[in-house]
Amino acid sequence: MAARVALLSSRPGATLVPGLIDAHTHLIGQGTHFGYETLGVSTPMETLWGARNAKVTLEAGFTTVRNVGAGGYSDVALRDAINQGLVPGPRMLVSGPPLGITGGHCDDNLLPFERHAASEGAADGIDGVQHKTREVIKYGADVVKICATGGVLSKGDDPQASQYTLEEMKAIVADAHRLGRKVAAHAHGAQGILWATEAGVDSIEHGSYIDDAAIVAMKQHGTYLVPTMYLQTWMLENAQSIGLPAMYAGKMRQVTEVARKNISHAFASGVKVAFGTDAAVYPHGLNAHEFNVYVQMGMTPIQSIQTATVNAADLLGWSDRIGTLDLGKFADIVAVSGDPTKDVTTLEHPVFVMKGGVVYRNETKQ
Ligand SMILES: [Zn+2]
């Protein structure tokens, strides 16, 4: 509270908001590197990049993130290093390697058969997914990430095709929930969104082809949608200059053509929404550009801000500690110049960031 008073007196016209929450990031890794380029980067190097990305993300006003997918449990190490004060960064909930079918979006499909490459999260069948769910929890996952459908930035699969079966996802959710972990499902195609929802996952990530049947089911189950929309805007502008491989660029175009309309319809239909960015696909630190896309898609500015505060806190199961400025919660506070309830783009340039009472950015001193 002392910080609040001091800040207000030193910077009239600033607005305080709760520390922001991004429910879909990938802090680990070099970022904006795709396809075969990624094969030459070691896990230790990716982890060092993660430390750099964590600092950038925190300074952008994001005091909590959910990291949904990383190799080698590097995300567990980064989370623990941040908690131990070794490196600056947001509070992290991490998944470890994402679970997915053999050959699916969450497997490694770049190398030919004789290389025998498979991702750490590849798991098939009821027994296989049960074992993998228990394994990621054993090694430190706070949340279980699964791939329910194909994806864009993966070789040889179709974003609209379902990958895990309803039965496999039910088995994952049963184990994860029994062990106190939520489940986040990457899902583009409508059938996969519906099955993941029926299986009881806690959030649908991306949701590009969401249809009315999926919307009805998500509202019934209270499932959150975590759209990742700004990445599409950024990709349209930058796919060529970053050299996005052709095997991904075509899928990116197809998904981008329909996602905004489908997800705007989901917003208007009253699906619960939590803020997510997929930062890593575009440069870390631009996370807050997501707010204005939600406004362009029909949310009011305050609804857009709530996706990254109260809503995301609820999805993470951390409503008792983050998401609002309240006594008894962490002192995670961001200040922006002007009024974000009128103009959410003010959130793109925070002038003050405090996490747990420690100041990480302060441009309020004149
Ligand atoms: Zn992602």
Image: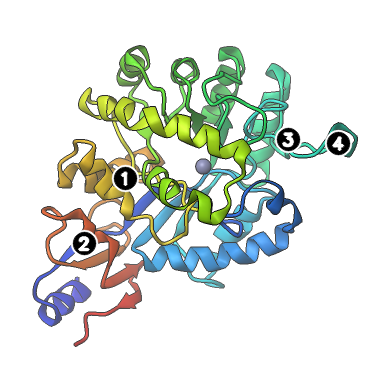
- Residue at image point 61% right, 40% down: 246
Is the shortest distance between ligand 1 and the CB of mark 3 under 8 Å?
no
- Residue at image point 37% right, 37% down: 227
**Depth-wise, is mark 1 or mark 4 nearer the camera?**
4
**Depth-wise, is mark 4 or mark 3 nearer the camera?**
3
The local crowd at label 4, few if under 14, some if 14 to 19, many if 20 or more residues have their Cα within 10 Å, is: few
Q: Report the residue marked by disc 3.
A: 109
Q: Secondary structure at mark 3?
A: loop
The disc placed on residue 116 is 4
Q: Report the residue marked by disc 1.
A: 319
Q: Earlier in the sequence, mark 4 or mark 3?
A: 3
The residue under label 2 is which amino acid type? Thr
The local crowd at label 3, few if under 14, some if 14 to 19, many if 20 or more residues have their Cα within 10 Å, is: many
Q: Residue furthest bottom?
A: 366
Q: Earlier in the sequence, mark 2 or mark 1?
A: 1
Residue 285 quadrant = bottom left
How far apart marks 1 and 4 lie (CA) works out to 43 Å
Q: Report the residue marked by disc 2.
A: 346
Residue 287 percent across, percent down from the top left: 38, 55
Residue 295 horizontal side relative to residue 277, left or right:
left
